[in-house]
Amino acid sequence: MKVLVTGASKGIGEGIATFLGRNGHQLGLLARSEDLLKQVQERVRNEGGEAEIQTCDLRDPDNVQKSIESLIARMSGVDALINNAGLVIRKDAFEISLEEWRAMMETNVHGLFYATRTVLPYMKEQGSGHIINVSSISGHTPLAGGSGYAASKYAVTGFSESLFLEVRNHGIKVTTLFPGSVDSKSHRHDPTEDTEWKVRPEEVGEACHHILTTRQFNLISKLEIRPLRKPS
């Protein structure tokens, strides 16, 4: 399966790319950092997978369209898009700045929409496709101290569930993925924190693999993945 992954240079995106590449998917990886993308690409290839990379600023709709179209051309098609890229700013409504609010909305909501609208015509024409939108548990449960982040992820959830109703008759699947606490180094507040109890990024990749490999006429529309328990 030919799969595009946004935010693929680190954290959950790197875990998704690593697991999918190891399990036979042909990957197109997008992120802002070319150096980090090359590292992920090398890791995927060293484990026997296939990966093309493309730098992309998800906040720029023209850049998103050109970047994704370039990858689709190099991969000779697209079967799935995983909208993973996201910005986490844990501040309450008293503390968050206008710039931080805009940055989260532009990445978490606008970028996801720009990427989705670019792949939809390809999927509609071929009568098949799968879009996985990575929301968060904060996309359905209030988050004190992170109202802006929760707002962006509630938007992802609402868009995803409505999009499914718009595209299902074209053979296009939409899944909303709700990760809980994930051991993403880029989001750690304390580098000495014990993270063994958290979900590993590659386990999110495993979930994506299972979502993508359902048979043609059924769908996992929502999936929540979280740690069993926090340390005592």
Image (tube, helix red, strand yellow):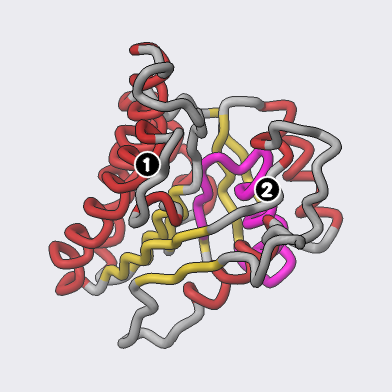
Does the residue at mark 1 contact the one at mark 2 (Cβ under 8 Å)? Answer: no
Q: Quadrant of residue 150?
A: top left
Q: In this view, does 86 lie above or below 23?
A: above
Residue drawn at (52%, 58%) of the image: 179
Q: Nearer the viewer, residue 100 or 159?
A: 100
**x, y percent for residue 84:** 49, 47
Pair 1/2: label in front: 1
In the drawing, does residue 168 fall left or right of residue 150? left
Give the mark, 1 or 2, whose residue is nearer the N terminus. 2
Q: Nearer the viewer, residue 30 or 85?
A: 85
Q: Can residue 219 be seen in this view?
A: yes
Q: Residue 61 bears which disc, if any?
A: none
Tell me where the magenta segment starts and ends, as one range: 3-25
Q: Check disc 1 and give the amino acid type.
A: Ala
Give the SS element for disc 2.
Answer: helix
Separation of disc 1 and disc 2 at Cα? 23 Å
Q: In which quarter of the image is residue 117?
A: top left
Q: What residue would you read off at disc 1?
A: 150
Asked whether residue 21 is drawn in magenta, I would say yes
Residue drawn at (44%, 71%) of the image: 223
In the drawing, does residue 106 fall left or right of residue 162? right
Q: What residue would you read off at disc 2?
A: 14
Q: In this view, does 212 lie above or below 63?
A: below
Q: Is residue 96 above or below residue 198?
A: above
Q: Report the quarter where the C terminus lies.
A: bottom right
Q: Check disc 2 and give the amino acid type.
A: Glu
